[in-house]
Amino acid sequence: MYNFNDKVNFIWKIAELLRGPYRPGKYGDVILPMAVLRRFDCLIEKTKDAVLERSKTTDIELILNSITGHGFSNK
């Protein structure tokens, strides 16, 4: 995969394999988030072990909810 078109074709080939239960017009809804998650995984590769270790002792959901303002109370 030396150029952009090769990469695009590669991703679409994977999409064709994964579309299974998805209608052709909708499987892009799955492929894009998967590509974004993979990119995040690549970006944190060097610190992933430390992040995973920290997540064992930190309430990640609470932190993310407070940052995004989407926290819910049990009241």
Image: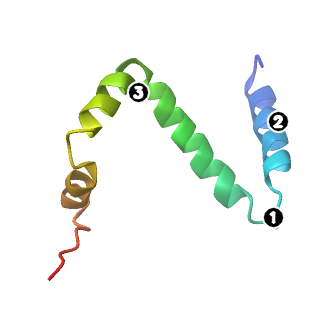
Alpha carbon separation for disc pair 3 and 1: 31 Å
Horizontal arrangement in the rendering, residue 37 relative to residue 67 (left or right): right
- Residue found farthest to the bottom: 75
Q: Could you tell me which residue is drawn at 68 percent across and 50 percent down?
A: 31
Horizontal arrangement in the rendering, residue 11 relative to residue 36 (left or right): right
The number of numbered badges drawn on the structure is 3
Residue type of the residue flagged with mark 1? Pro
User: What is the secondary structure assignment of the residue under circle 1?
Assistant: loop
Rendering quarter of residue 66: bottom left
Residue type of the residue flagged with mark 3? Ile
Q: Residues within 10 Å of mark 3 (few under 14, many from 20)?
A: few
Residue type of the residue flagged with mark 2? Asn
Q: Could you tell me which residue is drawn at 44 percent across and 27 percent down?
A: 43
- Residue 49 in percent (x, y) is at 36, 23
Q: Earlier in the sequence, mark 3 or mark 1?
A: 1
Disc sitting over residue 21 in the figure: 1
- Residue 12 in percent (x, y) is at 80, 43
Disc sitting over residue 44 in the figure: 3
Q: Quadrant of the N terminus?
A: top right
Q: Could you tell me which residue is drawn at 75 percent across and 29 percent down?
A: 7
Q: Which residue corresponds to mark 2? A: 9
Q: Could you tell me which residue is drawn at 17 percent across and 75 percent down?
A: 73
User: What is the secondary structure assignment of the residue under circle 3?
Assistant: loop
Q: Residues within 10 Å of mark 1 (few under 14, many from 20)?
A: few
- Residue found farthest to the front: 56
- Residue 55 in percent (x, y) is at 28, 39
